[in-house]
Amino acid sequence: MSMTPTPAHWLDLFTHFASLSLLAVGGAITTAPDMHRYLVGQQGWLSDAQFTSSIALSQAAPGPNVLFVALLGWNVGLNAGGGAAGGWPAWGLALLGVLVTLVAIMLPSSVLTYTATRWAHRNRERRDVRAFKTGMAPIVIALLVATGWLLSAVHNQPARDWPLWLLTACATVLVWRTRIHLLWLIGAGALLGAFGWV
Amino acid sequence: MPAPPQRPAEPTAAPATRLDLFLSFSWLALQGFGGVLAVVQRELVEKKRWMTREQFVEDWAVAQIMPGPNVVNLSLMIGGRYFGLSGALAALAGMLAAPLVIVLLLAALYGSVANAPAAQGALRGMGAVAAGLITATGIKLIAALDKNAMGMAVCIALAVATFVAIALLRWPLVWVLLGLGGSACTWAYHVLGHAEAARS
């Protein structure tokens, strides 16, 4: 279950992720199902468990969640080098995997976004540019609230999950009404969870 | 008749250098457990005052609709506004560099703690707080709709429809953005045209 680290395979990996870049409307995570199909199903470069743990680890770490893509690349490279037992050559390939997947997922969309938003900024007085921003504002605000809702709805057993919901509600009110530092809240959530209280 | 559109108030501060951009984005990325957006709003709008609430909503709308990772798009836009391409790259590097190192260290160490109940519990707790942060960010930004040319009633109706479609009906994001977003932009175009005609 690993790729042969030939230039052709790296190129294939790069072009696949680069093509997903332009399809990732709503965030890179929306393309995760296709990455799974490609890496685990079609190519067999990653195991199912490695795919799932890559996503879970990136959620636990600070920073943008696009970093799950870097972890996928890391594991593809590591597998190609014979796993953690492969020593330095394997770590080197893992870093190459990070570079290839992360650049591929970001480059096309970033070039497009940068060019388009510079244009829109120069033309910010045009009626169509203003209409876009005016019209989209209520939609994206609702999307934020909906995201919070969906994250909570994963836990769907009231008898077991009510402490989690209460914690989410408290965090919402505190962030909304006070200027408490966000790291205190995250830390409190981690402690409550570690002690098994939520 | 909706109120005429007002230009949002100007922000009161700006990053001094590209290094300032890089360090500011590193600092906010490192606070972003379970999503960076709530931190961007808190740090750049409320603390540093680099952008107004209205500008933040406008930028976030664009970052969301463009393909690619949202927060990456947002970094490019904010950085690019101050120092052009080099500013965009400084902000992007700040957003990614330190978190990338951390996540790779975590991956290298993974296995020793992954199955401990305390570690899994901590993840659950942090996830619940992160859901609250993102919800509160949305609630706080509702105030930014005050200055929206479509008027508050239309904005609330659009927001409720979006919430129902995404959170309750679980429709795909692309269709919601095209359908509701497209209608909203068309209506806004119409309203802004009236406002311009009324002023001239």
Image (cartoon, rainbow, N blue to C red):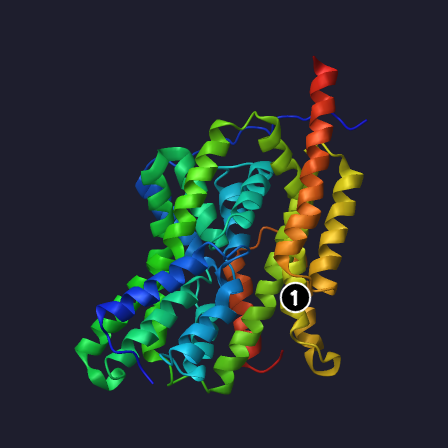
Which residue is found at the position 40% from the left and 53% from the top? B27
Q: Residue at x 51, y 81 (%)?
A: B120
Q: How many marks?
A: 1
Residue B47, above or below B131: above
User: Could you tell whether A136 is left or right of B150 in the image?
Assistant: left
Q: Residues within 10 Å of mark 1 (few under 14, many from 20)?
A: some
- Counting from the top left corner in percent of width and height, residue B190 is at 72, 30
Asked which quadrant contains residue B8, the reply is top right
Q: Is residue B30 visible?
A: no
Is residue A89 something that shows in the picture? yes
State left or right for residue A37 relative to residue B160: left
Quadrant containing the N terminus of chain B in the rendered view:
top right
- Which residue extends farthest top? B200
Q: Chain of mark 1?
A: A
Residue A29, compared with residue B118, is above or below; it is above
Q: Label 1 belongs to which residue? A: A150
Residue A181 % position (x, y)? 53, 55
Q: Is residue A103 left or right of residue A24?
A: left
Q: Position of residue B198 (x, y in %)?
A: 74, 17
Residue B98 image offset from top left, x and y in percent? 34, 59
Residue A19 location, quadrant? bottom left
Q: Residue at 65% of width from left, 55% of height from top?
A: B175
